[in-house]
Amino acid sequence: MSTVYYRRPAILSRPELRQGHAVIEASAGTGKTYTLEHLVLDILISGEASIEEILVVTFTEAATRELRERVRALIRKVCDESRVIDPAEDPAGYWAINENVRGRLREALFRFDGAAISTIHGFCQRVLSEQAFLGGHLFEQEVAAGEELFGFAFREEARAVLAEESTAGQMLRGWVEDGGRLSELEKFLYRCHREGCPDRCPLTPLWDPDGFRQALEALPDPDSLKESGAGFYGEKKLYSGLARIIDTLTETVAAMQTEGNPARAAGLFLEWAEKKRTINKIKKAQLDHLEEMAALPGAPSPVKNLAAGLKKISEQAADEAAFFAWELLPLVQTRLAVQKRSLGQLDYDDMLVGVLEALQGTQAPVLLNLLRRRWTVALVDEFQDTDPVQWEIFRRIFVEGTENHRLIVIGDPKQAIYSFRGADVHTYEGAKQDLVSRHGAALLRLTNNYRSTGVMIEAVNEILTAGRNAETGEGGFFSGLNHYGKEQMVECGDESRIALEEGLPAVPVHLLHLHGGGEALNARLLKEGLACFIAEEIRRLTGPGGLAAGRGVKEPAPLKLSDIYILSRTAAEGRLIGEVLRRYGIPHAFYKQEGLFGTDEADDVYRLLCAVNAPADTATRMAAWLTPFFGVPLEELPAWKEAAEGHPLTALLLEWKKIADAYDWRHFFDTVLADSGLVRRLVFAGEERALTNYLHLFELLLAEAHSRPITLNNLARSLKARIDGRKMPEGREGDVQRLETDREAVQILTMHKAKGLEAEVIFIGGGFSNVKDRGIKQSIYHRDNRRCLHIGRPFGVIGKMIEQEIAEEDQRLIYVAMTRARSRLYLPFFGKAPDSTGEKDAGAYGYNYLSSFYRGLQEQLDRLACSGQLEDGTYYRIRPVSCRENPPRERVEVPEEAAWPEDRTLLEMPPSRAGEAAEIEPHHRGVLLTSYTRMSRGKSWQAPAG
């Protein structure tokens, strides 16, 4: 067969990518996965490595499966390629596929099942199991949920500590006596444990009671402070505020010095520091006021010394939570390690740490040699979500101490949004710097966006770069580690992609100018008003003359419901929008909604299992009858209280218990669904979400019942443990609710879950109100490029570092949300309307409680409004949205596929006869077992005479 040619992506023709390490930064929509799969093909075609010598690491199981299939399909496609290029075309843009190359590709297909394409955890687990001797691990270990293992160790250690007279015992008893919940403390310590505290991740504030007391004693005398500040701060109208701060501080210090418990003394200080005070019409924490006063030019030395002393105290003001992280956590970690070793268990974090420890141990040279002989090239996807442990593993194997191996990482630091899971963009930046500066790696960027229309790309670029200094590149939407300069800015890679509305080019960005009809907005009005607009706009977009989109030579297709995504900041915001869509009769689904075991359906199933397990228990039985499995109305429940065994509902429980006691679990769950009528009732009520959850829960319980010998009582207890969070669901998505429908439906999802997805139309439907912290406050920051964890409210330098990191993470999350759109993006706008809009009450717009999360984007839109760029009808359209209009409270339209075509009286519930049933129940003989033959002969049971 003659030589044929296959087009090669332009970036793979770059000479700097032909050898050595490489860092590829791929902005949203630029074809990251496409580039990655072609990188594998390029290595195979060049003969640099065989398919078994290439290690490809992704970060999710779903991405791994997709990439495996795409690489396999690509290799097969190239093997079958028969295209001969035009001599006028540049051969450098193609791979030459001759017989030798084709033979290598066919061999790769034959050996593809041995290809190492896996998650980072899959790779590490493979290393630990195959090289168990070198790593000091068992050949076979059970993978268990880390949170569940930690919870067991915590509860065991808590029992032991509570019985002790140690400081830890006294503190823990005090925590419980003051109303603290051990479950909350367990979750807090598990977060610290996952971060690697205190060994790999330093903790602040420090637990140093002696140093804390010494810092208190070193504070300046309050009289000298007032005397020195009277003249300087009196001129600036700050002295009265300073005097009040000093007076309250003096009282607090006196109380702290008499408090024998250092953690509680620290709590008193933190309470003083966090207290808000208004000085010169500025309201902020007292400690923040004092630090600003001390920072003024010419501030008196005693005040500066006071601020410095308080800074030191704040870094050592370890309250009860910090005490437990320093003193109790190591005890739990020791017990956890012993527990894992004795049971042969490990969790996902252990896989990574275990490989790193093996690479740092005495057998490291032997292990490195084995791994390097096996894999010569490593490709790491989503590298912006790496962490220090993962980077150190790749660095030791493929970078440090070898010149015959290659590491190619690909990612986008602007999409690093998973810091709460341990992902660390600072590690990414450090790794990039190390690879490029020390090891000569090529730095390449993908800047052609193939996802969105040209006008959409230009509009988003304009929003992101508004206010940026053209000479220095500083300013704009991004700050800190986030960059979007000329090197990163994307341009349209597919000019054939178009969107039309009423036959004309569609305006890509619609700004929803939310207002209260001349009155101030509150959060409730804002959220509901926006949700109602979204519902009405979806109807318009999918109706006649709505949006149509397409690419290439194909005619633009009308928009479908599944082409629309609504992105929220929190799941609660998404549920509110879903409720409004339900009222409008718009089919919708929640994409990968978490919290299956936190739903009402999980509680209902638990009550059902308890009632089946103990049908004679009146309270348990009545609790089950209130669930949709029986549907007894609450007001009628007393009439059913004394139901005997012959009662139909009690008879059902007894029949189900008989099946469960026989351990015929599949028959048990099938019978419950059939006999209860649950499916029928939920289908007629349109409760697809609830029905899907019930079926999902039954499936999970059936799988658990088949996995090990188990009684109905233990099955109920296992479900309760999951509901309470004491037991973790199996798998990474074991607590994710399934989609309730496979028909056309609008998708509602959080911004975090939207990463990697795209849609024709994106609505930003949340993120406008600040999210309240729950539980013990924990914050990540970096000091000297090292990840640290701060417990409690941060102050001073640490507080500013944390604020900056939160702001940068928010910027990245908003970038991810905005760049999901192909044709249309809807953004709420809280600024002043341009005069050209002709809005009469333009100045009355705004939302006084706009979150810090959304404020950065709003500032960019304000800059565009001030410069007149929002009046450009090519990129933007401003849509006034009144949040004062009363939204519909009932469904205003039912989708055709859900309409009931027959007599709707069939759906009405008949009048209850519960009272009549209670009267005749004592005279009811009960269930009679007979036969058809006996009945046909007239020999069925007859009432006795008299």
Image (cartoon, rainbow, N blue to C red):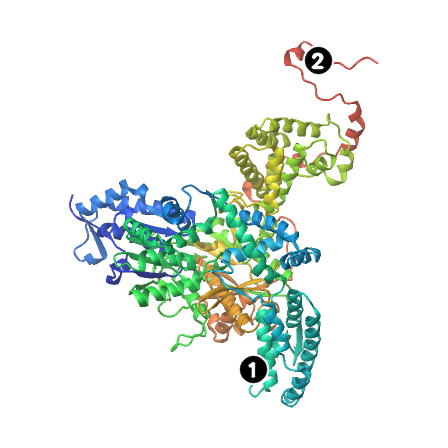
Q: What residue appears at the point 60 percent right and 70 percent down from the top-left corner?
A: 210
Camera sees residue 841: no
Quarter assignment of residue 236: bottom right
Residue at the front extreme of this rendering: 165
Q: What residue appears at the point 26 percent right and 44 percent down from the top-left corner?
A: 108
Q: Nearer the viewer, residue 753 or 678?
A: 753
Q: Secondary structure at mark 2?
A: loop
In this rendering, the answer to whether 816 lies above or below 668 is below
In the picture of the structure, the residue carrying the numbered disc 2 is: 940
Q: Residues within 10 Å of mark 2 (few under 14, many from 20)?
A: some
Query: Which one is earlier in the sequence, the residue at label 2 or at label 1?
Result: 1
Residue at the top extreme of this rendering: 937
Q: Position of residue 486 (x, y in %)?
A: 36, 70
Badge nearest the viewer, 2 or 1? 1
Q: Position of residue 838 (x, y in %)?
A: 56, 71
Q: Nearer the viewer, residue 761 or 774?
A: 774
Quarter assignment of residue 941: top right
Q: Secondary structure at mark 1?
A: loop
Q: Position of residue 472 (x, y in %)?
A: 39, 77
Numbered mark located on residue 295 in the image = 1
Q: CA distance from mark 2 to mark 1?
A: 98 Å
Please give left or right for residue 489 compared with residue 686 in the image.
left
Q: Label 2 amino acid? A: Ser
Q: Label 1 amino acid? A: Ala
Q: Position of residue 21 (x, y in %)?
A: 29, 60
Tags 2 and 1 touching, CB below 8 Å: no
Residue at the right extreme of this rendering: 946
The quarter of the picture where the C terminus appears is: top right
Please give left or right for residue 495 compared with residue 882 in the image.
left
Numbered mark located on residue 604 in the image = none
In this rendering, the answer to whether 740 lies above or below 329 is above
The quarter of the picture where the N terminus appears is: top left
